[in-house]
Image (tube, rainbow, N blue to C red):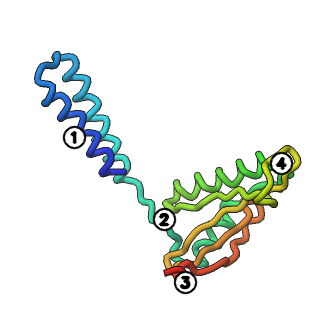
Amino acid sequence: MKKKLVLISLLLLSTVVLAGCVSASDYEKVQIELQDAHDKIAEIETLNVSNKFASEDALIEWVSENSNYSVSYDVIEWTAHALDQQNKAFEDGYIISVEIAPEDLQALPSYDSVYTIFCSAVLENGNYYIWDPEEGIPYLWININVFR
């Protein structure tokens, strides 16, 4: 992300230099956009996203503290709970995934389709855990290092 913003900044600046004849107001606009890009880079650098939980205990503790939802019987509300948990994880410096899987992978979605909603995370040791965001109990699924 940082490299992308730096590249955008350089492109904006080089556009002005290469054009050769730009008005002062256009130049000022580009300078403001350039400063905005630098501010965004500084903001991103302050985020402390480690991506992975250090241990199973850390994951279990975090999930149990952040799964305080009533059980929903609606896929939209269930998904909202999962996305809310994903947001909380990012705020706390972790990245978790939200999966929405239809019961029948071959059928087209319809009003009476059955879905499973779950969150997942990879620990530093490669263990991949899944859990229902409303239940809040992580289950070890697999260690992703077996794929290497």
Q: Is residue 50 visible?
A: yes
- For image coordinates 49% across by 60% down, the residue present is 93
Task: Report which residue position mark 1 lands on.
Answer: 10
SS at mark 4? loop
Residue, far bottom = 146
Would you name the residue on which mark 4 appears? Answer: 74
Viewer-side residue, 38 vs 2: 2
Instruction: Work out whether mark 4 precedes mark 3 in sequence or the reverse, and give the earlier one.
Output: 4
Q: Check disc 2 and report the residue beneath it.
A: 51
Residue 47 location (% of width, % of height)? 41, 54
Q: Are marks 2 and 3 in contact (CB under 8 Å)?
A: no
Residue 119's place in the image compared with 57, above or below, is: above
Q: Nearer the viewer, mark 2 or mark 3?
A: 3
Q: Are marks 4 and 3 in contact (CB under 8 Å)?
A: no
> Does 38 sit left or right of 17 as displayed?
right
Query: Disc 1 or 4, which lies upstream in sequence?
Result: 1
Q: Quote the CA–CA distance across marks 1 and 4.
A: 47 Å
Where 95 falls versus 81 (above or below)? below
Q: Residue furthest front?
A: 106
Label 3's element?
helix
The type of residue carrying mark 3 is: Val
The reply to whether the C-beta atoms of the residues labelled 1 and 2 are less than 8 Å apart is no
Residue linked to disc 3: 146
Sequence-wise, which precedes: disc 1 or disc 3?
Answer: 1
Measured Cα–Cα span from mark 4 to mark 2? 30 Å
CA gap, disc 1 to disc 3? 42 Å
Q: Is residue 55 left or right of residue 133?
A: left
Camera-side mark, 4 or 3: 3
User: Where residue 44 appears, x then y in whole percent?
Assistant: 37, 50
Q: Amino acid at mark 2?
A: Asn
- 54 relative to 26 in the view: left or right: right
- The mark that comes first in sequence, 2 or 3, is 2
